């Protein structure tokens, strides 16, 4: 696959994919724990996931820069 996302949008694409996969997994686990494997599980899970993703994506975009700053202070820089 050829790259198609400009570098200036990399942080947004990162947040989009990270929030997508994390919210998909977590909402699936939470839905399973709440309902079990019942009829209509996938539909309930996807509905739950879309709601979760709508919150997770902007949250990742806002929180990620803060986390990077904190880690920059905690991590010892690698020496070449």
Image (cartoon, rainbow, N blue to C red):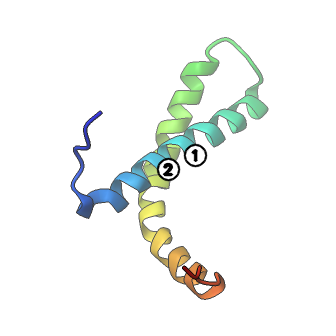
Residue 60 image point, x, y percent: 48, 61
Q: Which residue does the numbered mark 2 point to in the structure image?
A: 18
Local crowd at mark 2 within 10 Å, few (<14), some, or many (≥20)?
Answer: some
Q: Is residue 46 left or right of residue 28?
A: left
Viewer-nearest residue: 34 or 9: 9
Up-down relation of residue 31 to residue 58 (above or below) = above
Label 1 environment density (alpha carbons within 10 Å; few <14, some 14–19, many ≥20):
some
Q: CA distance from mark 2 to mark 1?
A: 6 Å
- Vertical comparison of 18 with 2: above or below: below
Q: Name the one closer to the observer, 42 or 19.
A: 19
Q: Position of residue 12 (x, y in %)?
A: 34, 58
Q: Which element carries disc 1, helix, strand or loop?
A: helix
Q: Tell me the residue at 53%/41% (across/down).
A: 21
Outermost residue toward the top? 39
Where does the image place residue 39, in percent across and percent down from the top left? 67, 11
Q: Can you say which quadrant of the picture contains the N terminus?
A: top left
Q: Quadrant of residue 43?
A: top right
The numbered disc on residue 22 is 1
Task: Decide if residue 62 is on the left or right side of residue 27.
Answer: left
Q: Residue at x 42, y 64 (%)?
A: 61
Q: Quadrant of the C terminus?
A: bottom right
């Amino acid at each position: 696959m050829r790259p198609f996302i400009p570098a200036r949008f990399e942080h947004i694409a990162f947040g989009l994919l990270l929030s997508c996969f994390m919210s998909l997994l977590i909402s699936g686990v939470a839905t399973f724990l709440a309902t079990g494997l019942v009829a209509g599980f996938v539909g309930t899970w996807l509905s739950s996931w879309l709601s979760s993703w709508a919150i997770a994506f902007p949250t990742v975009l806002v929180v990620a820069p803060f986390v990077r700053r904190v880690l920059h202070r905690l991590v010892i820089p690698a020496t070449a």
